[in-house]
Image (cartoon, grey):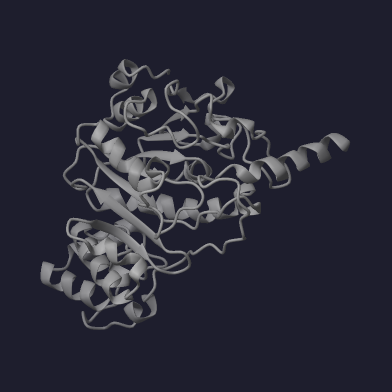
Amino acid sequence: MRRYKRTLVAAALATTVAGGTAGWASGGAQQAVTGAPPGSAAWRTDGALGRPLPDPATAGPRAIASFFGTLTPGRQRELAHRHPSVVGNLDGAPVALRYEANALAIRAAHDPRYERLVAPGRQILAFDPRGRGQVAEVYGDLTAAAHVSVVVPGSDIDAATFDRAKDPYGTPAGMATSLRTATGDRTAAVAWTGYTTPVGVGLDAATGDLAEAGAGRLARFTQGLVAAGAAKPALFCHSYGSVVCGLAASEVNATDIVVCGSPGMRAGRVAGLRTDARVWAAKDASDWISKVPNVEFAGLGHGPDPAAPEFGARRVPATTAHGHTGYFVPGTDSLRAFAAIALGGSAGARTAGVSR
């Protein structure tokens, strides 16, 4: 019993830092934003087409894609203008239509925190102002690119901070743009802040509740990319984001799941993830995540270290990365390896020094 108590205490104290990118600050409990997009009630009662519109809460991405395929471009745009918050967040809807709808929704919000998101050239694939805000931004041509990457962030990230200038390689926008540049712009990359992340150091970061809520949203998002004509993506999951990816692994439509600075994936081994995707892990020696005990007990902690040999993931080199947010810094061996994985070839990954 004393041994179990020690394990529980270690999990409670140490794993509370497992998701953070903003330092050792206290964190408050967060309420996960889930469910249908804002404005769904009005969408459901819209009879302008003379037939019911697909219910955002129950229709899957393939059904959404099929529905929009029956509409003329003009009809599609009419729906986007009447219901921008719904169309902009419908996984499976045409990509360009979602960009247009989200630009309308952001302008309608009249919130100075989000005005930058409608600057020329920005491609916002999802926008939900509820809670701390959720957003997904695309870099490159999503439907034309042969390879697509999706970055899933850890704690302290929301619609206001996902592209902050401070510590850029600790943000999904910085990670995604750095990764795309490292591939010679031969990929499309998505900075996905599509779930409610933990804030600072607190119980949320030590438990899987927010990750469980995010896992369903991530799975649907990846399915929606493919339904809308994009390539099957590779996922790059940082810190607490790797917990999200671990819980979503059996349902995401992905070629690869790459975790870095991970506190655990809520699985004992790769086989426990129940995925056909290739699973990769990176951890540099200076990352403070190494000081977090890899335990899971009574709902606290996230399980074994994915970078440990016994977990069974393919190892990504990270000898020149530094710290918890250094994996996507230009010039590092980890970023070179990530780029090789993003381009889809195991041969290229081996050239970059990635272990199988």
**Among the 4 quarters of the image, the one containing residue 50:** bottom left
12 or 80, nearer to the observer: 12
Q: Is residue 54 visible?
A: no
At 88% across and 37% down in the image, what residue appears? 2
**Where does residue 202 sit, x and y in percent of width and height?**
64, 52
The image shows a total of numbered marks equal to: 0
Q: Residue furthest front?
A: 166
Between 164 and 247, which is closer to the camera in this rendering? 164
Q: Is residue 143 left or right of residue 337?
A: left
Residue toward you, 324 or 343: 324
Image position of 314 with respect to 49: above or below: above
Q: Nearer the viewer, residue 45 or 132?
A: 132
Residue 129 location in percent, x, y?
A: 40, 68
Does the image show residue 299? yes
Q: Position of residue 178 (x, y in %)?
A: 30, 37
- Residue 152 location in percent, x, y? 42, 45
Q: Residue lying furthest right in this view?
A: 1
Residue drawn at x 33%, y 19% as measured from the top left: 352
Q: Quadrant of the C terminus?
A: top left
